[in-house]
Amino acid sequence: MSKRVAIIGGGAAGFFTAINIAEQNPKLAVTIYEGSNKLLTKVLVSGGGRCNVTNTISDPIELTKQYPRGHDFLLPVFEQFTSDDTERWFTERGVPLKCEDDGRKFPKTNSSHTIFNCLTTLASKHNIVVKLSHRLENFTQVENGWQLEFNRLAVTCDYLVLCTGSSPSIYNLLGTKDIEIVPPLPSLFTFKAKDHSLVDLAGVSVEKSSVSIKEIKNSSENGPLLITHAGYSAPAVIKISAWYARELSQLDYRFTLVINWGSYDANRLRELFKSYTVDRPKERIMSWKEHELSKRLWLHLCQVAELKEYTNWSEIGKKGIQRLTSALCQFESQIAGKSTFKEEFVTAGGIDLSVVEPDSFRIKGQPNLYAAGELLNIDAVTGGFNFQAAWSGSFIAAKSIALNSQ
């Protein structure tokens, strides 16, 4: 009788684990159990429906720098399976990827359905059984394997792989098995502004901003920034929310966001304005074009600096220069909450990595029990890195199971 592998979760990690097990050891009977009635939901919505599969960064050391949690654990993992391996894997199975200017890689079709179809077709090809609406309620170690309980249905398996993502019920279940869980909380979110003074500028974006959190020392992130009706979004905000997810939770998401609208050097900008008082004395300040910001935002910042429409450079004075420099480089906005960044939402927390073997993704002290994907205390900034951790971990878990079962 074939040995049986049960994979809990029909997402990216679950399917990638199942397919790689089947390809490396066709003798195994592999079944995916999904609690809902849908498969690969995050694959379908990620990247605005295009699926950001991975990133151009492939050097293991550089790749680990994209992970606020899990970077040390992932170094030997990426040495086994990196982003280049992910691209090769999909290309060899009929899904070539393309690279965008920011390093993100998508299927050339620009459709997440291409990845969905690839994974589900391969699962069918390798006779992987997929069962929907099978929510795991308990698992118990039995002789040579595990007994699983789904809605009054009990099955047994030789190998069990947990790929459930951030599931509160699974966290609770793991706690009863003395498997240590790092308390989960949101990562990758946008900021809600208190008394949003820039609401009339909603939709205005800045390509080269720098943001920091006043209450967190040395916090800083660069990148595009978007003013929304509720507050602030885009990569600069999303990334800083990931790096300081736990600190922001401790602040109850109430803090001061400091924005440098153009990643300006404040001292150089101050000296530049000072030179204009001599070189451009009669030029109106609001007519300045070199700021590279939208006109609406520039005029608003001039108002914040208490400058009049008719004020010229000869009239600005030292205090005016200081106010304008501060408005551009140290604009402060009070934040009073967060909003989910739905396309890329991930969770910080999960199974403590100290109980996971990085060369196999087996849970220590638990025979033939494995875990991969977002269920682990691993999360990354945006750019395809969260999927990459799932592909890499799933591949290693699959390889371990395929070899050990022979």
Image (spheres, helix red, strand yellow):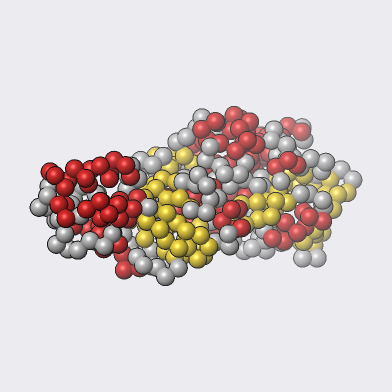
Viewer-side residue, 390 vs 204 = 204
Q: In the drawing, does residue 371 fall left or right of residue 113?
A: right
Q: Quadrant of the C terminus?
A: top right
**Could you tell me residue 326's position as x and y percent?**
33, 53
Q: Is residue 97 visible?
A: yes
Q: In the drawing, does residue 38 fall left or right of residue 106?
A: right
Q: In the drawing, does residue 349 fall left or right of residue 222?
A: right
Residue drawn where x is 78% and y is 55% of the image:
175
Viewer-side residue, 237 vs 22 = 237
Residue drawn where x is 47% and y is 58% of the image:
256
Q: What is the residue that sits farthest to the front in this orientation?
A: 318
Q: What is the residue that sits farthest to the left in this orientation?
A: 282
Residue drawn where x is 28% and y is 59% of the image:
305
State whether residue 307 is above or below residue 104: below
**Could you tell me residue 27's position as x and y percent?**
73, 38
**Could you tell me residue 24's position as x and y percent?**
66, 34
Q: Which quadrant of the figure has residue 390?
A: top right
**Could you tell me residue 187's position as x and y percent?**
56, 54
Q: In the drawing, does residue 360 fall left or right of residue 283?
A: right
